[in-house]
């Protein structure tokens, strides 16, 4: 995997309502979740972006080599729009600043994320056909916040948003997606609630 082939985007735009506190700042073994995910992304590429409505809140914990992007409200709206919009806005910035063919998209709340597994997946990118995305799949469908997308998908993404789509599943249903092998489903575990956090801390 050559660095020029891949960049990474980490989403930190959620409201953390179920957690009751900012998930991105929750520490596992003394390391905030957002920082942990950024560090793992940097094992795959030196080009890492974090998109959030609150860049100043995270500046002190995001690795200095990462780029913070200010997420903005769509016209007529003033609340977070969900990950699809955040991804599109980050991808717009990435295309202006870094010419890469692929982007690794990650949620900020993945405590069991494996850099080794991501690198194994990334090694397959040079041999992919016409797929718009390479994603793991669970019983719920595609797992869109831990996988790879062609940066050229931005046009399709914009069109979906203009149609009113706010769901990754809805957008991906219209695209050619290749499945990534998932040998450890725990890697996709999202730390969403205090109970989840307690479980992760016990296991760590």
Image (cartoon, rainbow, N blue to C red):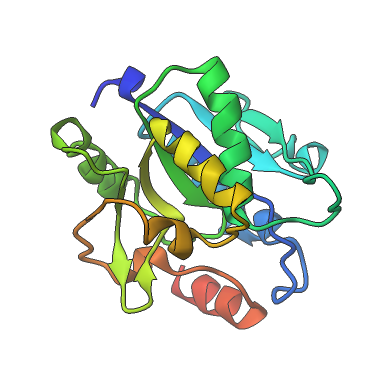
Measuring 49% from the left and 18% from the top, which residue is drawn there? 98
Q: In terms of depth relative to the viewer, which is nearer, 193 or 173?
A: 173
Q: Residue at horizontal 74%, vertical 63%?
A: 15
- The answer, for residue 66, to whether it is visible in the render is no
Q: Percent position (x, y) of residue 43?
A: 38, 34
Q: Residue 134, image x and y in percent?
A: 28, 49
Question: How far across and down, in percent of the image, does residue 116 sit?
Answer: 27, 46
Count of all numbered marks drawn on residues in the image: 0
Q: Residue furthest bottom?
A: 195
User: For this view, does 113 lie left or right of residue 164?
Assistant: left
Picture residue at 18% right of the left edge, 30% below the top:
126
User: Which residue sits furthest left?
Assistant: 127
Q: Nearer the viewer, residue 113 or 161?
A: 161
Residue 198 image point, x, y percent: 59, 78
Which is nearer the eye, 30 or 45?
45
Please give left or right for residue 179 compared with residue 189 in the image.
left
Picture layout, residue 168 above or below residue 106: below
Q: Residue at x 86, y 50 (%)?
A: 76
Query: Given the current orientation, which residue lies at the most extreme front position?
Result: 163
Quarter of the picture containing the N terminus is: top left
When the figure is inspected, residue 180 is found, relative to residue 137, above or below; the finding is: above
Q: Is residue 62 above or below residue 184?
A: above
**Quadrant of the rendered structure where residue 193 is?**
bottom right
Q: Answer yes or no: is residue 25 visible.
A: yes
């Amino acid at each position: 995997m050559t660095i020029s082939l891949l960049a990474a985007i980490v989403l930190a735009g959620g409201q953390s309502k179920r957690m009751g506190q900012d998930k991105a700042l929750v520490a596992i073994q003394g390391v905030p979740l957002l920082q942990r995910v950024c560090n793992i992304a940097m094992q795959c590429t030196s080009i890492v972006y974090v998109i959030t409505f609150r860049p100043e809140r995270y500046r002190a914990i995001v690795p200095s080599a990462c780029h913070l992007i200010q997420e903005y409200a769509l016209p007529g709206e003033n609340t977070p729009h969900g990950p699809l919009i955040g991804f599109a806005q980050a991808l717009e910035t990435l295309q202006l600043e870094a010419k890469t063919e692929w982007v690794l998209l990650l949620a900020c709340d993945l405590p069991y994320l494996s850099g080794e597994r991501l690198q194994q997946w990334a090694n397959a990118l040079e041999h992919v056909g016409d797929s718009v995305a390479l994603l793991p799949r669970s019983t719920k469908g595609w797992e869109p916040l831990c996988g790879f997308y062609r940066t050229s998908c931005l046009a399709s993404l914009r069109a979906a948003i203009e149609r009113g789509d706010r769901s990754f599943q809805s957008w991906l249903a219209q695209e050619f997606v290749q499945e990534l092998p998932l040998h450890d489903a725990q890697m996709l575990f999202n730390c969403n609630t205090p109970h989840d956090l307690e479980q992760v801390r016990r296991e760590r």
